[in-house]
Every structure is written in structure tokens, then in C-alpha cells.
Amino acid sequence: IVKEHYMFARGGSKNGQDFPARFINYFPLSRYNLKGIAFEKNQINKEEIDEILNSAAEEKALLIFYAHTGNKNFSPTQLEYIIQNAQKLNYNITTFSELIGN
């Protein structure tokens, strides 16, 4: 059903996988079970952000960061930190709309 209506779907992390692998999407991608990581301040700290960025950069893997802007732990500073450090590692920062040409 998902494939009929959606081009991508985000699933949960896999049980038994350690950090940071449980949040990294390795190629070939599983389009209907993509993993993401919340970046609200109560979910992940800067050391963990650095670890996940570095690990995924080594593998040239896909990361999906997300947050709920209405959450009291949402932090624009945390988002800026992710973007700045991802750029230092030459990440291609994009949206799914850009990926599929919408």
C-alpha cells in the first residue's frame, strides 16, 4: 500500500543495531524503511551529532535529521550546528522534494 501512495517512508531503527548505525541509511537504500534521527536537544547531544556525521561521511551514507518545531526542546542552534558540521564534511544537504525533482 505504501508504494502505491508514497515514494519514500521512514521506519524505525533496527533492533540490535548500535549507535550510530541504527540511524544511518546505507546504500542501496530501502526507500520504504528509511531511518531518521530526531535532533531535539533532549534526543541527541553535539558529541553524538559529530559521531553520526563522521560515521555516515566515511560510508557516503544518507542521514535524515528531523525535529518537531513545536517541541520545547527544538533548537535552531542545534540545526545550525548540524548544517555547519555537515558542510565541513562536504555533505550534500537537500530535501526529498529536490531529490525527486518536485
Image (cartoon, rainbow, N blue to C red):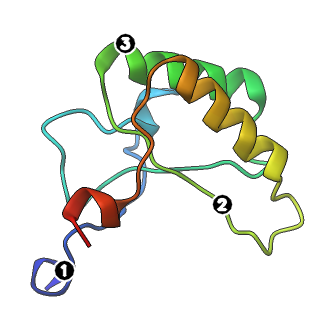
Q: Which residue is mark 2?
A: 67
User: Where residue 77 sits: x, y (%)?
Assistant: 83, 44
Q: Earlier in the sequence, mark 1 or mark 2?
A: 1
Q: Earlier in the sequence, mark 2 or mark 3?
A: 3
Structural distance between the alpha carbons of marks 3 and 1: 31 Å
Q: Which residue is mark 1?
A: 2
Q: Is residue 45 left or right of residue 101?
A: right
Q: Earlier in the sequence, mark 3 or mark 1?
A: 1
Q: Of the numbered discs in the image, which one, if any, rests on residue 89?
A: none
Q: Say which element carries label 1.
A: helix
Query: Can you tell which quarter of the image residue 6 is in?
Result: bottom left
Q: Are marks 3 and 1 in contact (CB under 8 Å)?
A: no
Please report the residue visible at 51 percent of the width from the left and 16 percent of the height from the top.
Answer: 54
Image height of 83 relative to 79, above or below: above
Structural distance between the alpha carbons of marks 2 and 3: 24 Å
Please report the residue visible at 40 percent of the width from the left and 19 percent of the height from the top.
Answer: 57
Q: Of the numbered discs in the image, which one, if any, rests on residue 58?
A: 3
Please report the residue visible at 47 percent of the width from the left and 50 percent of the height from the top.
Answer: 36
User: Where residue 40 sits: x, y (%)?
Assistant: 75, 52
The amino acid pointed to by label 3 is Glu
Q: From where the camera sits, is residue 84 visible?
A: yes
Q: Say which element carries label 2.
A: loop
Structural distance between the alpha carbons of marks 1 and 2: 23 Å
> Which residue, as the protein is rendered here, is positioned at the far top?
58
Q: From where the camera sits, is residue 41 visible?
A: no
The residue closer to the viewer here, 13 or 69, is 69
Q: Are marks 2 and 3 in contact (CB under 8 Å)?
A: no
Please report the residue visible at 41 percent of the width from the left and 28 percent of the height from the top.
Answer: 21
Mark 1 or 2: in front is 2
The amino acid pointed to by label 2 is Ala
The amino acid pointed to by label 1 is Val
